[in-house]
Amino acid sequence: SAVISQKPSRDICQRGTSLTIQCQVDSQVTMMFWYRQQPGQSLTLIATANQGSEATYESGFVIDKFPISRPNLTFSTLTVSNMSPEDSSIYLCSVAAGQGRYEQYFGPGTRLTVT
Amino acid sequence: DAKTTQPNSMESNEEEPVHLPCNHSTISGTDYIHWYRQLPSQGPEYVIHGLTSNVNNRMASLAIAEDRKSSTLILHRATLRDAAVYYCILSGGSYIPTFGRGTSLIVHP
């Protein structure tokens, strides 16, 4: 398994500002992912964070809005840029681990409220 | 990814077994069946996964139909801590789960 921590755990931000969320893993992992969970909804994959190359974004998500860094095999950041109230969500990072990497482990999430 | 169908919610009594069904009639030969659960105010938690054979681990059992078009997650003795949303997911040969709405399990004391 893998233990994942996220900072901050929650934040309240003003419209038009940006927030950077940090994700730290207790072991080296190849694949890290960022998800969004809007209130009352299921999880939506934002992007896959690749070490040493640009992140791979899912349809509907763009780098200018959600820039991602992956400087090493244990750490990644997601920035939510130029925020609007529609960005109010829980943001979660996860890693693929376990045998064959078919197990995903999630961080506790960052609860973001944009006013 | 192939689609899964789960009931929106199920109820159980504490210390009774719970069988959570999942239909995946369009499953392909390379799709693994994964189950995750999400407790209130927490990130999802891996529960179990399998391909063709039934699987057991310390958390649950996964029973896979012979034609693989359905599966059942079995919690042998439900506790109040098992109240969560349970997601059945097909991975399509990759390890990036696509989450649906899941089944909200309510456990009564």
Image: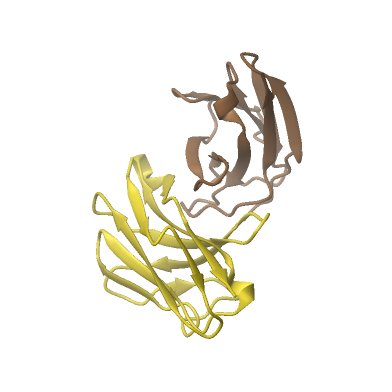
Chain colours: A yellow, B brown
Residue A43 vertical position relative to residue B31 in the rendered view, above or below: below
Q: Name the side, left or right, on which B8 lies relative to B59.
A: right
Residue B24 in percent (x, y) is at 69, 42
Is B36 left, or right, of A79 in this rendering?
Answer: right
Q: Write the residue at 33% across / 66% down.
A: A76
Residue A97 visible somewhere in the drawing: yes
Q: Position of residue B1 (x, y in %)?
A: 62, 56
Decide which of A32, B79 is in the foreground and name it. Answer: B79
Q: Up-down: is B99 above or below B73? A: below
Can the viewer see residue B62? no
The percent position of residue A25, horizontal first and vertical second, equals 29, 53
Compared to residue A103, the image places residue A39 above or below, namely: below
Q: Nearer the viewer, residue A84 or B24?
A: A84
Q: Position of residue A111 (x, y in %)?
A: 51, 60
Q: Which of the image's four quarters has the C terminus of chain B? A: top right
Is residue A96 found left or right of B45 in the rendered image?
A: left
State the residue at coordinates (64%, 74%).
Answer: A86
* Corner quadrant of residue A7: bottom left
Where is B44 relative to A78, above or below? above
Tag count = 0
Give the left or right position of residue B8, taking residue A20 as reference: right
Q: Nearer the viewer, residue A15 or B20?
A: A15
Q: Find residue A31 and report its image quarter.
A: bottom left
Q: Which residue is drawn at the image coordinates 70% and 47% (left, top)?
A: B26
